[in-house]
Image: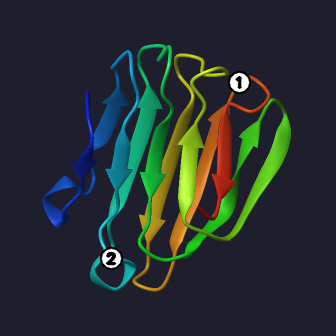
Amino acid sequence: MTGATTLTAEDSGKVFILNAAAGAQITLPAVADAAGHDYRFIVGALFATTAWTIKAATSKIQGGVIVNSTLVPAADENTITFSASADTIGDFVELNCDGTNWYVSGMGTSAGAITLTVV
């Protein structure tokens, strides 16, 4: 993946390699329309200046990721950010949807590599 995109049902089950020098925003489908959808995002190239973000329309991201050996929880978040200053090739997140929430899991190597927030 090299730029901004909005995901659709046809993208469910795919693995997206984030391999652009500058990050962009990836927009998830509406949670109510995404039951059974799953996506995986992996850092495939270091991005020098701009973070990659994964954005949900509503604050329905739940779960957590392990970042630098520490659990970073998600409770009613809407944005996942891969930091441009702490990214490591191989950092990843996976999202699964039940039609009510997006459930996130993943791993980031360096402190601050992945954040989960409401933006």
Write the residue at 44% across / 31% down.
42
Write the residue at 48% across / 27% down.
50
Q: Position of residue 67 (x, y in %)?
A: 75, 36
* Mark in front: 1 vs 2: 2
The image quarter in which residue 55 lies: bottom left
Q: Position of residue 70 (x, y in %)?
A: 86, 40
Q: Position of residue 9 (x, y in %)?
A: 18, 65
| Sequence-first disc among 1 and 2 | 2
Q: CA distance from mark 1 to mark 2?
A: 30 Å
Disc marking residue 39: none
Circle count? 2
On screen, residue 54 above or below 88: below
Report the side of 37 relative to 96 (left or right).
left
Disc marking residue 30: 2
Instruction: Please identify the residue farthest to the right as the structure is shown.
Output: 70
| The N terminus - image quarter | top left
Q: Which residue is mark 1?
A: 109
The amino acid type found where label 2 is placed reads Ala
| The C terminus - image quarter | bottom right
Q: Residues within 10 Å of mark 1 (few under 14, many from 20)?
A: some
On screen, residue 57 above or below 68: below
At mark 2, the secondary structure is loop
Write the residue at 66% across / 58% down.
117
44 or 55: which is nearer to us? 55
The amino acid type found where label 1 is placed reads Thr
Report the side of 5 relative to 62 (left or right).
left
Q: Are marks 1 and 2 in contact (CB under 8 Å)?
A: no
